Amino acid sequence: MPLRAVCCLEKGPAYTPPKPLYKACSEPRVTEFYRQYLAVAVFVVAALLMVAAMLGVGRLLRPTLPQEDKYLTYESGSDPLPLFGQANVRYYIYALLFVVFDVEAVFIFPWAVGAESLGWYGLTEMLVFIAVLLLGLAYVWRKGLLKWA
Amino acid sequence: MSESVLLALNIGWGTTLAIKTVVVLAFIPAAALILGYTFLLKMMSHMQSRLGPMDPGGFHGWFQLVGDGIKFMQKEDLMPAEADRRVFALAPAVIVISTFLVFVVIPAGPRIVVQPLDVGVFYALAVSSLSVIGVLMAGWASANKYALLGALRAAAQLIAYELPLVLAVVGVVVQAGTMNLQGIVLAQQGGHIFGWGGIGNPYILTQFVGFGLFMVASQAELTQPPFDMPVAESELVAGYMVEYTGFRFLFFFIGEFGTAFAFAALAATLFLGGWAIPGVHGTTADVLGPIVLFAKVMFVAFLMFWARFTYPRFREDQLQALAWKWLIPIALVNILATGVLKVWVK
């Protein structure tokens, strides 16, 4: 029974389950929730197994003739120079911008699902939110951060 | 006990999941090979007058793919002495995992789906972007200048185009009122075009802007030409893949073409009505659904590869400018327009 209690706390009494896409189960919804994501976990394991199996089969089939030169870093045929260790700062700016703009997706999607029921109220909220985002983009643009200098 | 129904057989959910996993496991490499054979080998040969892939085995070079497979098997497994061995070995696996996970939510029939998660689209786009991590791992662990440059370019490109990709889908979610891909297909099937429900309402009719954005952004996410700065053969050799040989290289191929298939399937599901056929329901739809979806996937993939074989490469600054100055503002305006129409017109 504790599972069912958690389920009720999470979903609230007014929750109406979505149209069932397959036969409903008689067990608490929390279990069903985890079971859905069990498929995701199984797929991670399956992908790893496939990679391991293919490499294992490959090991049986391929030749192995070690020579020192084969393990040199490829640099179009010339002797490799030491690797530089720093990346260009431009990528850093784009990563920062990405964080700012990607978080918005977290806010937009819940509204998108309930756009009809939220009506004009939700739409006005989203209008203001996206207007602020566009202002932010315009600011970044004006500041010249979008220019590849 | 709970049980799910798979084509009239009553079996437990564990068995069902195992069967589905094995089927998808076998299907993804096959999908990659189908796309690689049809488009990369044959369509490109015809469009660009390439004679090599048309030669082996006689008729239309049918043996080319088998020959490539044999070649990959015979390749020695080389790992540069300078490489970070564990990360180097794990990177292709991360990319394969990211490809596999997208297939969990793509429905091919009313009951032909591994798991119709409620956050469907959101989940699919989230796991597909996990491949950035694999690319960065591969580029960094190779300890190679080409690989590092390629990986950094790829990371900058993938995150820039992640935004229009995600935002392009919001319009569809607004219209369908759900993120569940199965729900989106059903919403399209049950839709009406000005009161006429003959073919439902494929969202490409109302979300053509979103479809365009999705196609451009997914092309960039796949690092296909014209967005192939990260792998640019003529200057970076093959970017982050340069130090990989044999089967390890093959995983990048499976990742790239498997993801191309997944994105084409997502586009077909979100904008072209997915597996749905007008007036067909129940078990018939379960049987015909995968065929219909496959036909739509091949059509969308044709569009993707058509662009790939036609346009020259973008410069890095043009590429970033296209994402930030065009696609993202257009996507945001599209979301607002869809929202206004949804609330106003219903």
Image: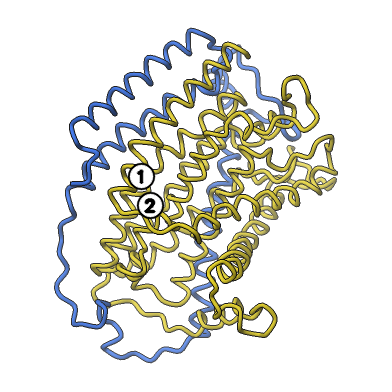
Q: Looking at the image, which residue is at 38% across and 62% down?
A: B91
Residue A14: quarter of image: top right
Q: Nearer the viewer, mark 2 or mark 1?
A: 1
**Where in the figure is residue B324, as x and y percent of width and height?**
33, 38
Q: Looking at the image, which residue is at 61% across and 28% down?
A: B206
Within 10 Å of disc 1 (Cα), the crowding (few <14, some 14-19, many 20+) is many
The one of A126 and A17 positioned closer to us in this rendering: A126
Q: Looking at the image, which residue is at 52% across and 21% down?
A: A10
Amino acid type, residue under disc 1 in the picture = Ile
Q: Earlier in the sequence, mark 2 or mark 1?
A: 2
Q: Which chain is yellow?
A: B
Query: Whole-Å distance between the Cαs marked 2 and 1?
Result: 8 Å
Q: Quadrant of the N terminus of chain B?
A: top right
Q: Looking at the image, which residue is at 31% across and 58% down?
A: B151
The residue where tag 2 is placed is: B132
Question: Is disc 2 placed on a helix, strand or loop?
Answer: helix
Contact, mark 2 vs mark 1 (Cβ under 8 Å): yes
Relative vertical location of residue B294 with respect to residue B119 in this rendering, above or below: below
Q: Disc 2: which chain? A: B
Question: Is disc 1 placed on a helix, strand or loop?
Answer: helix
Q: Chain A takes which shade in the image?
A: blue
Within 10 Å of disc 2 (Cα), the crowding (few <14, some 14-19, many 20+) is many
Q: Is residue B287 left or right of residue B252?
A: right
Residues behind callouts 2 and 1 on a single chain: yes
**Where in the figure is residue B41, as x and y percent of width and height?**
57, 70
Residue B208: quarter of image: top right
Amino acid type, residue under disc 2 in the picture = Val
Q: Quadrant of the C terminus of chain B?
A: top right
Q: What mark, if any, has residue B159 been given in the picture?
A: 1
**Where in the figure is residue B65, as x and y percent of width and height?**
60, 76
Relative vertical location of residue A116 with respect to residue A105 in this rendering, above or below: above
**Where in the figure is residue A19, as x and y percent of width and height?**
70, 25
